[in-house]
Image: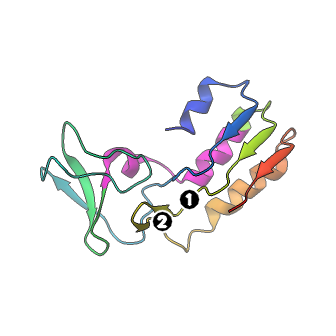
Amino acid sequence: AIIARTVLTPKLQRLNLSKCNLTSKSHVHPLTPVVGGSSGIGCNGGCDCRTFEGTNAYKHCADCDLDFCSTCCMSQCPMIDLAESLERLPHLVSLKLSECSFQGGRMGPVRSHLDIDGYQVLGEALARHPNIRELDLSK
């Protein structure tokens, strides 16, 4: 959601995603759709939604015992989303991604460690960007 909002700020010059937990529907294990369940279920994805409200429709990983809200399940690859947002932000001069997690949820791995395409697309977009002078990729 944070990355998608960049479409509203084309003149943005600084973007700080440090310590963000970005995830997507690309989970390490198969996800099972669940309808109903407990009203106290929280999302283990990157949206930081602590409890589901409304429909209580979500997806569950039996191997990890993790639950993911519909927003996290519908989101695309976060690296590709970030790469696309860089094209919409021609005035960006500073991008901070320190301690940014593209693969981990609050409770452990969320995305597959075999996904290299997203990282390649993001790297290419960073290399093409004409104005980024400050790039923080520190741990």
Residue contact between numbered discs 2 and 1, judged by CB atoms under 8 Å: yes
Residue toward you, 42 or 82: 42
| Residue at (37% x, 44% y) in the render | 71
Q: CA distance from mark 2 to mark 1?
A: 8 Å
| Residue at (52% x, 63% y) in the render | 103
Q: What colouring method underlies this structural image?
A: rainbow
Residue 76 lies in the magenta-colored region: yes
Query: Which amino acid lies under the numbered mark 1 shown in the image of this protein?
Result: Phe
Q: Residues within 10 Å of mark 1 (few under 14, many from 20)?
A: many
Query: Which amino acid lies under the numbered mark 2 shown in the image of this protein?
Result: Arg
Q: Residue 69 in the image: x percent, y percent?
A: 31, 49
Q: Residue 122's quadrant in the figure? A: bottom right
Quadrant of the drawing holding the C terminus? bottom right
| Residue at (78% x, 40% y) in the render | 94
| Residue at (73% x, 24% y) in the render | 11
Q: Which residue is mark 2?
A: 111
> How many numbered discs?
2
Q: For numbered disc 1, what is the local secondary structure?
A: loop
Q: Residue 76 in the image: x percent, y percent?
A: 49, 50
Residue toward you, 88 or 94: 94
Q: Residue 113 in the image: x percent, y percent?
A: 54, 73
Q: Residue 27 in the image: x percent, y percent?
A: 42, 65
Q: Which residue is mark 1?
A: 102
**First to last magenta residue range:** 68-86
